């Protein structure tokens, strides 16, 4: 581990003896993560498509759902609505994300979440040997083995939730 950060995510990984590398993501002047994450990852020998994005939705029922997906795919709204049995589904608002997940936008991990957040994992995550996830701390990401990450998705449903 190159930089020491502490978050519920790193604590969970350490408890489960999962090896991970911390990747510092320089923040721009407006304190947002840089936009050239792909370039940064490539420079560290990581596949830029192996970023597991944590996309938070809110259903008409009020339930928050996090979809973990890798690569450049986009969520298939129809499939998600059907799977979740929701007539209406929308992206969570910027200020709803920390309220629902406990993390700020740009640092949301797909693990170490409140039990109230339902997690769906797209099969695209399996396309990579090593993945990069949010660390829970803005300006940092974590790289880890995909199989180790998948083992931590307790109770999450895996499926095809991305448009091909």
Image (cartoon, rainbow, N blue to C red):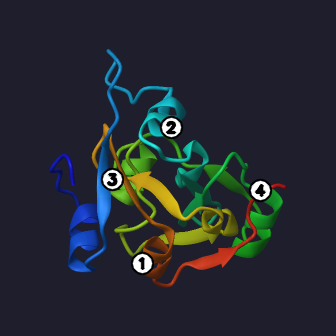
Q: Earlier in the sequence, mark 3 or mark 4?
A: 4
Q: Could you say which quadrant of the image residue 30 lies in? A: top left
Give the position of the C terminus as an image quadrant. Answer: bottom right
- Marks 1/2: CA–CA distance: 26 Å
- State the separation of the CA atoms marked 2 and 4: 30 Å
Marks 1 and 3 sit apart, C-alpha to C-alpha, by 14 Å
Residue identifier under label 4: 77
Report whether residue 85 is seen: no
- Depth check, mark 1 against mark 4: the one in front is 1
Secondary structure type for disc 1: helix
Circle 4 residues within 10 Å: few <14, some 14–19, many ≥20: some
Instruction: Report which residue position mark 3 lands on.
Output: 135
Q: Is 12 in front, or is 66? A: 12
Find out whether the residues at labels 3 and 4 contact each other: C-beta distance under 8 Å.
no
Tag 2 residue:
42
Mark found first going from the N terminus, 1 or 2: 2
Residue 108 horizontal side relative to residue 73, left or right: left
């Amino acid at each position: 581990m190159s930089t020491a950060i502490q978050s519920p995510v790193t604590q969970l990984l350490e408890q489960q003896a999962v090896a991970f590398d911390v990747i510092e993501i320089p923040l721009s002047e407006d304190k947002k993560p840089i936009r050239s994450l792909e370039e940064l990852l490539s420079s560290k020998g990581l596949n830029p498509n192996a970023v597991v994005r944590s996309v938070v939705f809110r259903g008409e029922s009020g339930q928050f759902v996090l979809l973990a997906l890798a690569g450049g795919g986009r969520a298939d709204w129809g499939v998600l609505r059907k799977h979740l049995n929701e007539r209406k589904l929308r992206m969570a608002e910027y200020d709803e994300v920390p309220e629902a997940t406990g993390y700020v936008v740009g640092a949301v991990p797909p693990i170490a979440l409140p039990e109230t957040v339902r997690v769906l994992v797209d099969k695209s995550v399996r396309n990579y040997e090593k993945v990069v996830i949010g660390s829970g701390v803005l300006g940092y990401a974590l790289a880890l083995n995909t199989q180790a990450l998948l083992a931590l998705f307790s109770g999450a449903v895996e499926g095809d939730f991305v448009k091909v």
